[in-house]
Amino acid sequence: MIKSAMRRFKLDLLSKHIYDDIYQRNLRPGDRYLTTEETAAMLGVAKGTANKVMRDLAHRQILVRNRKLGTYIGAKAPTGGQPILELVHLLIHRRYFLTERKRIEQIVTGLVESLNHSSVQLSFVPDEQDMQYTERLIRFAESS
């Protein structure tokens, strides 16, 4: 479970890099995007990893891929007017997580899918010193 969550987190970060690249270059739906090789070089990853991330973005209609024609910007890509939400902090008490794990996994999955360009950070409130820890997390979230 943890390894698959870490892999998903890495892919989400790579997706966010591509998403930010599209936004910063002010690309619009229909504009040509980088090849898999160029994307791999930009991200500093293997071609297979870049392909996996691009395939995921194509599934979410941020990219459109055609084997013979190349990769283009999709209908759900960011435009200059859309604000970019980079990180969502989800704070959950550990006891609640232990009893409602499936429901929380569904919530996190839903957040990741609906905020397809954002990273989701799940933090747990420990049993001891709940308020101090929570206040530190809130200060961290405000600064990020």
Image (spheres, rainbow, N blue to C red):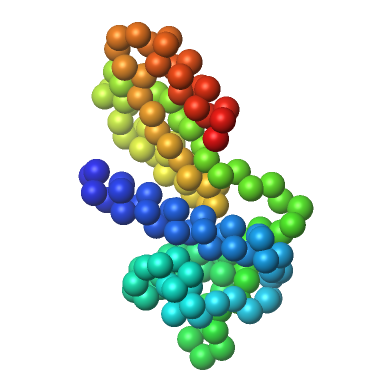
State the quadrant of the N terminus: top left
Relative to the observer, which residue lies in front, 39 or 75?
Answer: 39
> Most extreme residue toward the bottom, as rendered?
68
Instruction: Tell me if residue 48 can be seen.
Output: yes
Q: Is residue 130 above or below residue 78?
A: above
Query: x, y (%) of residue 60?
Result: 53, 61
Q: Quadrant of residue 63?
A: bottom right
* Side of 18 where 127 appears, left or right: left
Looking at the image, which residue is at 42% across and 44% down? 109
Q: Is residue 121 above or below residue 80?
A: above
Query: x, y (%) of residue 84?
Result: 64, 48
Number of marks? 0
Relative to the observer, which residue lies in front, 59 or 71?
Answer: 71
Query: x, y (%) of residue 37?
Result: 44, 80
> Most extreme residue toward the right, as rendered?
81
Looking at the image, which residue is at 62% across and 69% down? 74
Instruction: Tell me if residue 59 can be seen.
Output: no
Q: Is residue 81 above or below residue 123?
A: below
* Side of 16 where 108 appears, left or right: left
Looking at the image, which residue is at 54% across and 84% down? 70
State the quadrant of the C terminus: top right
Looking at the image, which residue is at 66% across and 60% down? 23
* Side of 21 where 2 appears, left or right: left
